[in-house]
Image: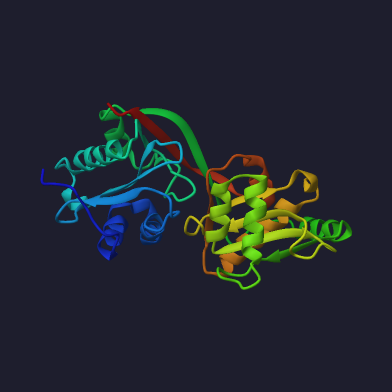
Amino acid sequence: MTDILPVEADGTLERLAAAALWADADDAALVVRRLADPPGERAWTALATPDRDGAVFTSIGADGAGHIDLIAVDPAARGRGIGRALVSAAEEWMRAHGAAEARFAGNPPCYAWPGIDVRYTPAACLAESLGYEQYRVAWNMTADLPARYDEAEHEADLTRLAAAGVTVAAAPAHGDPAGERAQVAGFVREQWNDKWAWEAEQATGLHYAFRDGAARDGEILGFAAWGARPLWFGPMGTAEAARGLGVGRVLLRRCLDEQAAAGQTSAQIGWVGPLRFYSRAVGARAERVFWLYRRALG
């Protein structure tokens, strides 16, 4: 096998990803662009064969573990050991950056998938053949768009929020002069973590709820975002003081309506925890399953 070398994440890699990742062909190019524009402090690289018939994105997580974020081999070049060579090169890069563990797992907040989609069976077989062990299962839900929900329930939620003095709004796009998006991201950082805050800052759409009388720089109660991971919904959260009002349902539906208006016919709800909430709120169904793998780097 010829050398695997660092490369620019350009249109060639986008086309390779679209050809190799049949279950994600529609957004593969967007995922490549997302991985190539992570948080500024992240150590990462893209490695490829000289002919660009195979490529891997790899990075270091906040805990120091190495991640294989995306691996793609041209269908016409499979069976030549390219996948194994790419993983080996990625592991060598991880060791050089101090990683003691390698993972086939998403590296939030900038990731492609939670792990290996079980439908990409050759990738799971490759990981296991190289000594990686499955340590977690994650799943996505799918919501058809336009979203299906009970209009009467939605109107009741809006009435309840209005009675409680709560308003919902969309944060302006990046670079808004009032810093509204930054204020929402600050709320997310304080209530949850830096990773979700980064996703809120990067999201295509960001909706939030706030208490009337405090203005938009006052008491924020909840948020929902979409597009930080291209075309997917999430993350979202409601402050404990506002739970039970229907804030989450309203913000979720606003995001999905916006995704539908952007031309999407379905939305992936990534890395789902509360299955019942999304199923009841918008008729979402559990659909994509991911296996997360790891192994120690000797």
Snapshot quadrant of residue 212: bottom right
Image-based side of 39 in relation to 10, left or right: right
| Residue 187 rendering spot, x and y as whole percentages | 67, 53
Q: Residue furthest bottom?
A: 177
Residue depicted at x 38% and y 60%: 33
Q: Specify the quadrant that holds the N terminus.
A: top left
Q: Specify the quadrant that holds the C terminus.
A: top left
Residue depicted at x 57% and y 42%: 272
* Res. 146 visible in picture: no
Q: Is residue 63 above or below residue 258?
A: above
| Residue 61 rendering spot, x and y as whole percentages | 42, 41
Q: How is the image coloured?
A: rainbow
Image-based side of 271 in relation to 294, left or right: right
Q: Residue furthest right?
A: 163
The number of numbered badges drawn on the structure is: 0
Q: Is residue 281 above or below residue 104?
A: below
Snapshot quadrant of residue 214: bottom right
Image-based side of 89 in relation to 264, left or right: left
| Residue 281 rendering spot, x and y as whole percentages | 69, 50
| Residue 261 rendering spot, x and y as whole percentages | 58, 70
Residue depicted at x 41% and y 36%: 64
Q: Nearer the viewer, residue 72 or 141?
A: 72
Image-based side of 2 in relation to 292, left or right: left
* Res. 115 visible in picture: yes
Residue depicted at x 24% and y 38%: 92
Q: Nearer the viewer, residue 225 or 24?
A: 225
Q: Nearer the viewer, residue 98 or 124?
A: 98
